[in-house]
Image (cartoon, rainbow, N blue to C red):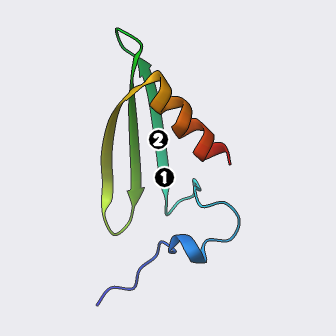
């Protein structure tokens, strides 16, 4: 069985979101019509390669997301 290279979130020293050779994060935020936002989060790990997530958020949901990320 292959050894995991990427540390679990609880074992990551310092911040939980890191950008190193073993873990890449790409975030893109685009404003759409009617005060709607498109948030794309792409992460790369050796075990899973690129994983792509998309969220369509209202302005209120985006504000909640930003508050949680910044806390």
Query: As drawn, is 49 to the left or to the right of 58?
Result: left
Query: As drawn, is 8 to the left or to the right of 58?
Result: right
Residue 34, image x and y in percent? 36, 9
Number of marks in picture: 2
Q: Residue at x 52, y 74 (%)?
A: 7
| Mark 1 neighbour class, 10 Å CA radius: few under 14, some 14 to 19, many 20 or more | some
Q: Residue at x 48, y 48 (%)?
A: 25
Residue 16, image x and y in percent? 59, 61
Is there a contact, CB below 8 Å, between mark 1 and mark 2? yes
CA separation, marks 1 and 2? Answer: 7 Å
| Foreground pick, 8 / 67 | 67
Residue 13, image x and y in percent? 68, 71
Element under label 2? strand
Question: In this view, which residue lies farthest toward the bottom?
Answer: 1
| Mark 2 neighbour class, 10 Å CA radius: few under 14, some 14 to 19, many 20 or more | few
Write down the residue under mark 2.
26
Question: In this view, which residue lies farthest toward the front?
Answer: 60
């Amino acid at each position: 069985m292959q050894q995991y290279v990427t540390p679990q979130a609880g074992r990551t020293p310092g911040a939980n979101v890191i950008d190193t050779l073993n873990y890449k994060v790409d975030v893109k935020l685009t404003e759409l019509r009617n005060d709607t936002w498109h948030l794309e989060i792409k992460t790369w790990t050796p075990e899973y390669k690129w994983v792509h997530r998309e969220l369509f958020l209202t302005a209120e949901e985006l504000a909640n997301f930003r508050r949680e990320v910044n806390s």
